[in-house]
Amino acid sequence: MSDRPINLLEYEAAARARLAGPAFDYYVSGAHDELTLRDNRAAYERLRLAYRVLVDVAERDASTTVLGAPLRFPVMVAPTAFHRMAHEDGELATVRAAGEAGTIMILSSLSTTAVEEVVAAASGPVWFQLYVYRDRAATEGLVRRAEAAGCQAIVLTVDAPVLGTRERDVRNRFHLPPGLHVANLLPAGYGAVDQPAAESGLSAYFAGLIDPRLSWDDLAWLRELSSLPLLLKGVVRADDAARAVEHGVAGIVVSNHGGRQLDTSVATLDALPGIVEAVAGRAEVLLDGGIRRGTDVLKALALGARAVCVGRPVLWGLAVDGQAGVAQVLGLLHDELDLAMALCGAPTLASITPDLLVRPG
């Protein structure tokens, strides 16, 4: 593409021009007034960088590991639903691009491609994001299928006992286009996200199928289903993070569901330092929400994140140019992080420390 976007914000604008209105609205929207959606982004803008000078940065190394898996750089693909609304190759294009970039893809339960097909197409690690259904047998089947397919971790979403109100989806009466289904739930009979009379089809899907009774007591049951490491996604409180570690989880994803659940909830970057302190190295801490620049990645790392996850920008790349678009989005973040490391006088991830950050005023 001669007119290929040169940053993630340009990818969003290009995706808006290519996607059907309801699909773009589904991907981009937040809950209610979208205050948390905006604050996730603003949290990065509130921090400034106090860069070091006269540091040898001729060579930089952004490689790391997450739960033992090597990453070329500390950016992972967050779980997002319904990739085939963005591009016909859907999750297959995304996982191939993630492998090309040398990183991990977290596959959504609400994938439009079956987990077995996605892992078969992968050249890098795939983790599986899990919703717990009222039908616990169906949930058990999902976990066992993910492990059998070759997924390397289970990421349990804990911030969605019910679905937040995304008013754009209500207005559009969101539903999946003909021919698309929740592929992983087709065997259990839960593959359809239909258009209801007066609300979002996904809201109706959650209300009827996702279990709002999920509690701390269920973590032991989930850990018995699989030998895979378990991470909790959707944590913003330090006490919840500490409790999760006591329950044996391997990792915490500091997340507010991209601002799509409880509006006016705390921005994830603001929640991160307290969670890192509470976890105290006993589990790995990841973060998502609002990341659009390499400097954002650096700021999250400086506050203690092991790595970050990006969701919407991956979908923008997918919509614009399929696998190549996703690869370009991830490549832009890699190159911007490399540049930020050089200009901050931080040639290694270990040298990205909290003293680089300043909060004006």
Image (tube, rainbow, N blue to C red):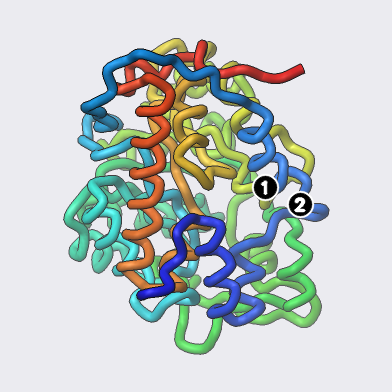
Q: Earlier in the sequence, mark 1 or mark 2?
A: 2
Q: Which residue is mark 2?
A: 34
Q: Are marks 1 and 2 in contact (CB under 8 Å)?
A: yes
Q: Position of residue 184 (x, y in %)?
A: 39, 66
Q: Residue at x 31, y 68 (%)?
A: 323
The quadrant of the image that shows the C terminus is top right
Q: Amino acid at mark 2?
A: Glu
Name the residue at 61% across, 48% down: 258
Mark 2 residue element: loop
Examine the image and state in which quarter residue 360 appears: top right
Instruction: Determine the image quadrant of residue 200.
Output: bottom right
Name the amino acid, label 1.
Gly
Q: Quadrant of residue 152?
A: top left
Residue 124 percent location from the top left of the image:
20, 50
Q: Is residue 127 left or right of residue 302?
A: left
User: What number of labels is visible?
Assistant: 2
